[in-house]
Image (cartoon, rainbow, N blue to C red):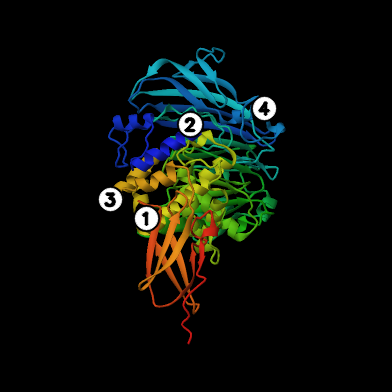
């Protein structure tokens, strides 16, 4: 089946530069929810919810218990007869399918639903006609159809056991420090492509959320701090005066402020003397909400001005154990990264007024929060910080669907965050690493085209498609267009789809329309077709006035041409060509005018993807001597 699909795609692309559009996406253009200029269509819609949540986190029993009221508004043109509610913590439920291993000690009975009410009417949780549970979704049938423009009030009470051993994305760290994510029943996305998103969370694929508002109260025991998505509404009710002053100073200082130090914890006077403390946060138009809890993590903060005209401040917070090596520099690195992303990389102001980096494990992004492990060396710390912070733009400003098209955010972030790596860690070239990894796996039978849905992949196929082929594809596109044109089109795409849900075609058509160039030949080869790059030198022939060098791309993917000519006197000459030379042909002839005698021609370098280096060198055995 896969062979037939790939063969069809390849044949269709050879005879036409049109992009293959699946039927369900064609319907979006017919319904005018999207347009082939890449802009949202006149009938584009997006649903919205306001969450009011009260949650109590017990770090001793490792329990999360919450109640929420959701006001959900149907902005679609459709009558909705059901709601799909995500229960991500059912990932740990006994018997559930997963594509990543979890500790047997963290497996439990799933999210315990205490009650659900719809517009004040309680749902019978035992009624299988009214409610059903799939691996990580809860589907509630509505007694009354939710009409276009109407809203509905959903209330849920729930609790679950928080994982202790599993630390990917979220979990327990340093015994008494926690990063809490995917913790509240969340209404799924209803969009113009698929209707309800019912893709299950099995561990590998990431997320797809609407832009919602949150009012959240987090209750924790005495001695524990909480940090979260959004604006902290009640610091004066929780912090003692001295620490409140340090916190407020950090919000207005471009100097690094150590808000909590080991000495502060020794004093035990950070918080006011309540047996339990309630931390209140508000967030507007964010796609998710996470929080962190600790009774020992150190807390640094530094504020940076990202817009000198409007004097827009962004505060970077860093939370870490005293034993951490990486995070002692994180607040400064993060603040500098935020400013660099805003000015030099995206050219769009950072979308949030604060961001908190928590020293947990791995690297995972959330709106206004990141969970990063210790990398072990400075350049690695810069890499991980810049990558996760850059996710604030994709998918948290531009709401891409990571479940179906994980490469849209990961590919762009993997490429563009490297600009900060180069700036902050001179002497390293992170682009070479990207291309080296790409060369090791591209062309393997497990490699799938980028347009193959992410939700259908796991393991190396998922990782390679999501991070490496995608970032290299964007890198080659930038080489073809030039940095200025690439960023011009990307910025327009970001502004068009700010706080909306673009799909790949919206990106492709925006570039085509903004640059007034049909790039479908490029999209087809790098994003729709299987294939790999393999340019090689076919021949070097003497001709009148010099030489003719013939190059063939034995693969299918267009890449730049970089020729090094080595003459008999050991002088060299560099000749380059754009990836566009492969647009209409897989062969290229380059005429070299010179009176010198060639000794050797070399093709490529470490910054050009190429699976086969064996055909990249052509040595001229016989040449006419110019020695008397």
**Labels 4 and 3: the sequence-earlier one:** 4
SS state under label 3: loop
The mark lying in front, picked from 4 and 3, is: 3
Instruction: Using a 10 Å C-alpha cutoff, classify the residue at mark 2 as few (fewer than 14 neighbours), some (14 to 19) or many (20 or more).
Output: some
The structure residue drawn at horizontal position 63% and vertical position 46%, both measured from the top left corner, is: 361
Q: From the viewer's side, name the closer residue of 273 and 132.
A: 132
**Labels 3 and 1: the sequence-earlier one:** 3
Q: Position of residue 244 (x, y in %)?
A: 55, 50
**Labels 2 and 4: the sequence-earlier one:** 2
Give the alpha-carbon distance from disc 3 to disc 1, as whole Å: 15 Å
SS state under label 4: loop
The mark lying in front, picked from 1 and 4, is: 1
> Would you name the residue on which mark 4 appears?
108
> Seen in the image, is 449 located left or right of residue 65?
left
Q: Is residue 26 above or below residue 408?
A: above
> Would you name the residue on which mark 1 appears?
580
> Would you name the residue on which mark 2 appears?
52
Residue 481: tell me if it is visible. Answer: yes
The answer to the question of whether label 1 and label 4 lie on touching residues, with beta carbons closer than 8 A, is no
> Would you name the residue on which mark 3 appears?
516
The mark lying in front, picked from 3 and 1, is: 1
């Amino acid at each position: 089946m896969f062979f037939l699909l790939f063969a069809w795609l390849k044949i269709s692309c050879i005879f036409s530069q049109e992009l293959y559009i699946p039927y369900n996406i064609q319907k979006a253009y017919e319904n005018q929810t999207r347009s082939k200029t890449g802009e949202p269509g006149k009938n584009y819609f997006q649903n919205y919810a306001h969450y009011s949540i009260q949650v109590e986190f017990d770090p001793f029993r490792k329990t999360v218990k919450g109640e929420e009221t959701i006001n959900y508004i149907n902005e679609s043109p459709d009558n909705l007869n059901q709601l799909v509610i995500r229960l991500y913590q059912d990932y740990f439920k006994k018997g559930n399918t997963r594509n990543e291993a979890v500790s047997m000690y963290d497996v439990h009975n799933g999210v315990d639903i205490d009650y659900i009410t719809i517009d004040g009417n309680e749902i019978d949780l035992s009624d299988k006609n009214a409610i059903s549970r799939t691996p990580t979704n809860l589907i509630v049938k509505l007694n009354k159809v939710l009409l276009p423009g109407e809203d509905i009030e959903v209330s849920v009470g729930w609790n679950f056991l928080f994982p202790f051993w599993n630390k990917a994305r979220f979990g327990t760290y340093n015994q008494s420090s926690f990063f809490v994510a995917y913790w509240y029943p969340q209404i799924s996305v209803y969009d113009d492509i698929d209707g309800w998103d019912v893709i299950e969370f099995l561990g590998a694929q990431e997320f797809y959320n609407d832009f919602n508002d949150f009012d959240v109260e987090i209750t924790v025991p005495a001695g524990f701090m909480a940090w979260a998505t959004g604006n902290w509404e009640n610091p004066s009710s929780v912090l003692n005066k001295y620490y409140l002053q340090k916190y407020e100073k950090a919000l207005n200082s471009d100097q690094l402020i150590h808000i909590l130090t080991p000495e502060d914890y020794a004093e035990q006077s950070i918080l006011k003397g309540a047996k339990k403390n309630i931390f209140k946060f508000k967030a507007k138009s964010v796609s998710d909400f996470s929080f962190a809890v600790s009774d020992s993590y150190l807390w640094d903060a530094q504020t940076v001005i990202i817009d000198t005209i409007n004097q827009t401040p962004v505060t970077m917070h860093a939370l870490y154990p005293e034993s951490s090596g990486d995070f002692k520099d994180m607040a400064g690195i993060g603040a500098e990264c935020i400013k660099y992303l805003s000015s030099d990389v995206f050219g769009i102001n950072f979308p949030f007024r604060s961001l908190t980096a928590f020293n947990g494990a791995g690297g995972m992004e959330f709106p206004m929060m990141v969970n990063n492990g210790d990398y072990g060396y400075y350049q690695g710390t810069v890499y991980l910080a810049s990558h996760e912070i850059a996710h604030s733009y994709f998918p948290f400003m531009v709401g891409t669907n990571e479940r179906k098209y994980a490469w849209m955010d990961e590919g762009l972030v993997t490429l563009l965050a490297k600009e900060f790596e180069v700036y902050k860690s001179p002497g390293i070239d992170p682009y070479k690493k990207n291309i080296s990894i790409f060369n090791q796996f591209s062309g393997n039978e497990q490699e799938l085209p980028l347009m193959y849905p992410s939700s259908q992949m796991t393991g190396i196929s998922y990782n390679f498609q999501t991070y490496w082929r995608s970032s290299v594809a964007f890198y080659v596109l930038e080489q073809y267009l030039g940095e200025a044109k690439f960023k011009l089109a990307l910025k327009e795409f970001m502004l068009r789809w700010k706080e909306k849900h673009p799909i790949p075609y919206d990106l492709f058509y925006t570039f085509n329309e903004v640059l007034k160039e049909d790039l479908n030949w490029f999209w087809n080869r790098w994003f729709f077709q299987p294939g790999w790059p393999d340019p090689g030198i076919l021949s070097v022939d003497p001709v009148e006035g010099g030489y003719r060098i013939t190059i063939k791309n034995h693969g299918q993917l267009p890449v730049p041409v970089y020729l090094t000519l080595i003459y008999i006197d050991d002088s060299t000459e560099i000749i380059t060509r754009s990836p566009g030379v492969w647009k209409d042909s897989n062969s290229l002839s380059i005429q070299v005018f010179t009176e010198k005698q060639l000794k050797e021609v070399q093709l490529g370098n470490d910054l050009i993807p190429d699976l086969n280096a064996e055909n990249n060198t052509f040595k001229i055995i016989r040449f006419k001597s110019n020695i008397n």
